[in-house]
Image (cartoon, helix red, strand yellow):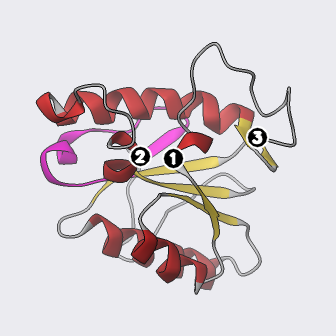
Amino acid sequence: MEQRAETPAGPSAEPPGPLLVVDGANVVGSVPDGWWRDRPGAAERLRDELVEVAAAGVPGAPGPLAVVLVVEGAARGVTGVPGVRVVSATGSGDDRIVELVAAESALAPGRRLLVATADRGLRERVAALGAELLGPRAVRRDPHAPRPADHPSE
């Protein structure tokens, strides 16, 4: 399993191109599939789904994307895999996401930043930093549904 080191403030050596930061707790919680019985397992399943998202992209942002999954609480032990870096929040996941977006904005001005969450407060905070907003469905799809490359207007 790949585990990249991270700086205290932000991402490290992400591939060029757009950066997608995923609010793990919020996106996992968007699908009532029993995630609450196994939070680390649910975060691992999301991480594994995000490998394809990293390659294929999301609506309006074709791949490849650099993907960072932010986890918190019981999911903190989840590690990264090739294509998806996992960052464990020691406190609030929302605060860690804001820190990552702010750090990336400072380190790579002009880089396209996308944040996947439905959390209204977090959406406001990262939009103020210039991030584009995506809902959970942009990164969690039915495996049989068409991909963004098939339907760019999604």
In the displayed structure, 94 sits above or below 73; it is below
Mark 2 Cα shell of 10 Å, populated few (<14), some (14-19), many (≥20) = many
**Foreground mark, 1 or 3?**
1
The residue where tag 1 is placed is 136
Res 54 quadrant in image: top right
User: Marks 2 and 1: CB-CB under 8 Å?
Assistant: yes
| SS type, badge 1 | helix
The question of residue 83 being in magenta is answered with yes
Residue 62 screen position, x and y as percent: 80, 43
Q: Residue at coordinates 57% horizontally, 29% vertically from top-left?
A: 141
Looking at the rendered structure, the kind of residue marked 2 is: Val
Residue 46 lies left or right of residue 147; in this view the side is left
Looking at the rendered structure, the kind of residue marked 3 is: Gly
**Foreground mark, 2 or 3?**
2
Region of the chain picked out in magenta, as a range: 70-85
Residue 114 lies left or right of residue 8; in this view the side is right
| The C terminus sits in image quarter | top right
Residue 35 lies left or right of residue 101; in this view the side is left
Residue 153 screen position, x and y as percent: 87, 43
Q: In the image, which disc is placed on residue 63?
A: 3
| SS type, badge 3 | loop
The residue where tag 2 is placed is 27
In the displayed structure, 117 sits above or below 85; it is below
